[in-house]
Amino acid sequence: MSSKERLHLELVGRVERKELTAVRAAELAGISLRQMRRICKRHRTEGDSGLVHRSRGRHPNNRFPDKMRSEVVLLYREKFGDFGPTLACEKLAAEGHELSSDTLGRLLKEAGLWQPRRRRGKHRLRRQRRSCFGELIQMDGSEHDWFEGRGDRAVLMVMIDDATNLMLARFFRRENLDSAFEMFQRWAGAQGLPRALYVDRAGIYRADREATGEELLGGIEPVTQFGRAMKQLDVELILANSPQAKGRVERRNGLLQDRLVKEMRLAKISGIEAANSFLDNGYLTELNDRYTCEAAEKADVHRPVDRQVKLEEVLCEQEPRVVGRDWCVRWNNQHLQIDKRHESLALAGKPVLVKEKRDGTLLVEHSGKMLDCRPVINRPEPPRRPKPEIKNNKKWTPPATHPWKRGLPPLAAAAGG
């Protein structure tokens, strides 16, 4: 089953146990009430298998061949990058590719090469709180002189639930990928996986690079390491367009910059470790007891972490690599030698996945199986021969035409006399 179908299965179970209404389950699943009732009926008659899509593994009869899809996308990128779908269809027809503007627009949107323009302004309303605990979590890092000169500057990472104001906070030296991963793992370990995560547009959350050739052919949008982890855990990552969009966590940062700074001044705290101990030993509990409110609905929609999922291996930096002919994989200017016991896999030239956990441990994975490997010392560079010292022992004798042998001019001779 896909992640979407597993979500439907979970919601159907909650509806059958009368923990959720069909209306609320349809909202959480993002489908209509009629569709949710149809899914519940199919589950009662066919069981879990009835939630699997009937078209799984089948392609529509009018689907364009994958080769033609990739050719159209590449041709559009090379020649018609700033054309709209209607004009691009006319130009592509001259190149021998006949397709409608709707089809081209869908292909370009899947590849991230085109977005429809808004013709008029959209009326906006104040965003209401989410109804259930775990439906939306906001996360942000607050850079501030937290120790008022008594120690180094630090960043306070804050996570707050949109429905209840329940907060988790921790100090780090800087807001980077490791601190974001650690914060999310702490929340997931305590509460479970939220449905959505609301963050700003910092570089660790937003991918600014252009898509590679393989991503263009596959219609894959480039993502950061954090975005890849959220997609792997089926957590929707929402990027805010302004600080006001995630005002709940911004206001909590303002509260902490006022109150927490003064509390740490009274406690004479001047370091990150002492500050985190202060947060864990009662201060966060006191704040949550004071500012947490009840959600509109009592249901907790956090999802438990699957037993087969190891969060420390998902919430880490990982990239694909290709095994060399010497059965080594290069990672961050070092080589990892794959053990000989995997010789039957014939890994030379095959792709593997290298993971670097936050504690520095390196893992190499191939087809879901961990490979034994060890770091090897890079081949030392050959010593360079020192350049021979240039010695000029030959006595130099001025030639006959040298000014020294011509004699002094008359005026100079008279002046010298």
Image (spheres, helix red, strand yellow):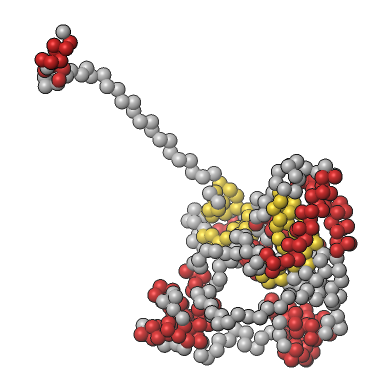
- Give the camera-side residue of 405 and 236: 405
Left or right: where 96 falls relative to 235? left
Camera sees residue 34: yes
Camera sees residue 192: no
> Quarter of the image holding residue 357?
bottom right
Residue reaching furthest top? 417
- Give the camera-side residue of 269 and 121: 121
- Residue at image location 57% in from the left, 54% down from the top: 338
- Position of residue 131 measured from the top left corner of the image (x, y, whole percent): 80, 76
- Residue at image location 75% in from the left, 71% down from the top: 136
Quadrant of the snapshot with the C terminus:
top left
Q: Is residue 4 above or below residue 361?
A: below
- Position of residue 279 measured from the top left corner of the image (x, y, whole percent): 82, 52
- Residue at image location 75% in from the left, 58% down from the top: 253
- Position of residue 409 measured from the top left corner of the image (x, y, whole percent): 12, 17
Quadrant of the snapshot with the N terminus:
bottom right
- Residue at image location 22% in from the left, 17% down from the top: 395
Left or right: where 383 falls relative to 116? left
- Position of residue 267 measured from the top left corner of the image (x, y, whole percent): 85, 44
Left or right: where 225 falls relative to 283? left
